[in-house]
Amino acid sequence: MKQAEANQTFSSKKVTLIDGNTLPELYLRRIKLSLNDTAYLVKRDGTYQPITWQHVHEQVGGLLKAYAKLGLKPGDSVCIMSNTRMEWNVIDLANLCYGLITVPIYQSNTSEDAAFIIEHCDAKLIMAEDNSTAGKVAAALNRLNRKTTLVSIEECSTVESATPLKVFAPPSANHQETLETISNTSKTITQDSIASIVYTSGTTGLPKGVTLTHRNFIYEVRGVVNEFRIGADDMTLSFLPVAHILGRIESLLPLFSGLRSAFAENINSIAQNMQEVHPTLLVSVPRIYEKVFAKIQTDVANQPKYKQELFSWAITTGREVARRRSSQEGIPIALMLKYQVADRLVFQKIRQKMGGNLRATISGGAPLSAELCEFFHACGILVMEGYGLTETSAAITCNTLHSYEFGTVGKPLTGMEIRIAEDGEVLCKGPMVFKSYYKNPEATLEAFTPDGWFRTGDIGEINQRGSLKITDRKKEIIVTSGGKNIAPQKLENMIKGLRYISNCLVLGDKQKYLSALLTLTEAEIQKWGRESGIAFEGYSDLLTKPETIKLIGDQIATMNQALAPYETIKKFRILPSDFTIETGELTPSMKVKRKVCIEKYRSYIDSMYT
């Protein structure tokens, strides 16, 4: 089958879904079914090497023995502070099989953040990745005056209190003993047992511990596997933080479906790693798709004019085919012939840069513009946007292989109910919805309506096809001094689609007009500056040049022409550097922390309204 045709089947050939009432039950069945099959791929010595389920089982067995020796009991909390890597998944599986509660801590968190979580969940054991994370944990424990056991996944040269994982839990080759231990433990675990406490990073305030049960995870992952027909012949490239709920659900896909999961070396190596492992499935946040799109735009802009025109023609053709497929219309023969030419000359090359085998891609964690979904679909890559929160175990709605509508986040997954409150807030109910906020009954009570529906905090609407469209965060709606209610999300997606712009924040609450804080793509704008003959000394100097301000201003002005007068951006300021997780402006899922940025860049904002 040709790749262009294969991309429209969007189905795996071999689905080996296993099921059970608890996650230990699923683990036991997976080991019995797939002991000699590949579970993960890890890059070592320059090449990706397969890791079998037998190897995983030996690691899990070693951890179970170490837990028993340490005196841990089912229901105890174990924190993991690490980047995405195989060991994170293996430790989580061992925790689940022993009845422990996995409590993720983002590797980018400060020691103060870690201290709050460690104390709040009363952690009995902490797994840290390396010198950096172990150092943060050690500082947190000193601050708390706790003597909690600290284990390092890698050997730490600077943290003496950290025991290396290979010393703490050497692998166990006693296959049967491990199975019997898990079988005995699993008898004490029910669907309502807490599997994890995930602390929301949030955009404001102290984190809240979301208690997620075995039932929550099972219904969520089962729904994803069924909707996307994920099977043992599928491959995913994992790079999302496993501490984030979307990355956590992805980490459980091999357990349910037999899917093989390869681990990206780091966030900057994704493009190269995709070329090496050729994933069939990609789970990501919008920022990654936005960066791929920006890179394609830059590459095309550097091509001769005739190639730019060819690309433009191909995209126009592809968009029309994508529109017809989305609305389930027929495709005329003449249009299909044009599409096949466009696919051979343009789209195949784009798909090859993303590994060449993608049959489905999932986007979540933050809003993705409909224009980007349409662009990728035109290229033969179906990006399916979903919607959910930590409190809903990730997705409660999603566009799927057989039902997708760009500009929406799809229909409810099996078992979920959705309704829109009088004020427009999206409410939901179903088996994916969390149990409670840990040690916070007041917040739990506030999170639900009197009749038991979870308040998502998002504003949305359900269209005629039954798909949900999120229009904004309930608390982020901008109300101008003229009384106009404006959803900044729509405008921010439009601005991020402009060339050279990396990120943005739209402002204007209680003001006469809207303004925006912008960050630019450093490499691209510097290349433009050199090609335009502008004399500048470094990136910061270029940002202040009148030519740069005019370039961005012209783009904003063109965008404004498609907006109602009260929606237009009247003023903007270019910030000296991009928003990042490390500097505190982004959440780990790469959503902008609005209040943090408003406080940090107050002088820039004031200058637009003075």
Image (cartoon, helix red, strand yellow):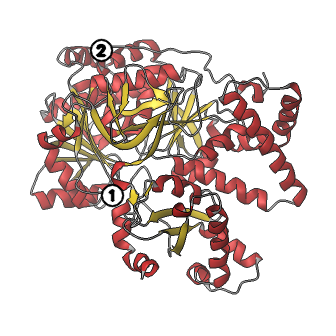
What residue appears at the point 76 percent right and 37 percent down from the top-left corner?
320
Q: Pick out the residue farthest to the left.
A: 145
Q: Which mark is residue 131?
A: 1
Relative vertical location of residue 393 with respect to residue 531 in this rendering, above or below = above
At which x and y percent is residue 489?
48, 53
The number of numbered discs placed on residues in the rendered structure image is: 2
Decide which of 402, 427 is in the foreground and name it: 427
- Crowd band around label 2 with a 10 angstrom C-alpha radius: few (<14), some (14–19), many (20+): some
- Identity, as a three-letter code, of the amino acid under mark 1: Asn
Q: Looking at the image, which is closer to me, 387 or 200?
A: 387
Where residue 173 appears, as percent x and y from the top left, is 34, 23
Residue 160 % position (x, y): 23, 57
Q: Tell me the SS state at disc 2.
A: loop
Tell me, for residue 21, which label it has, or none.
Answer: 2
Q: Position of residue 202 (x, y in %)?
A: 32, 51
415 lies left or right of 113: right
Residue nearest the observer in this picture, 380 or 240: 380
Question: Residue drawn 20% across and 49% down?
Answer: 117
Residue 159 seen in this snapshot: no
Marks 1/2: CA–CA distance: 38 Å
Could you tell me which residue is drawn at 70 percent across and 26 percent down? 8
Amino acid type of disc 2? Asn
Q: Nearer the viewer, residue 314 or 479?
A: 479
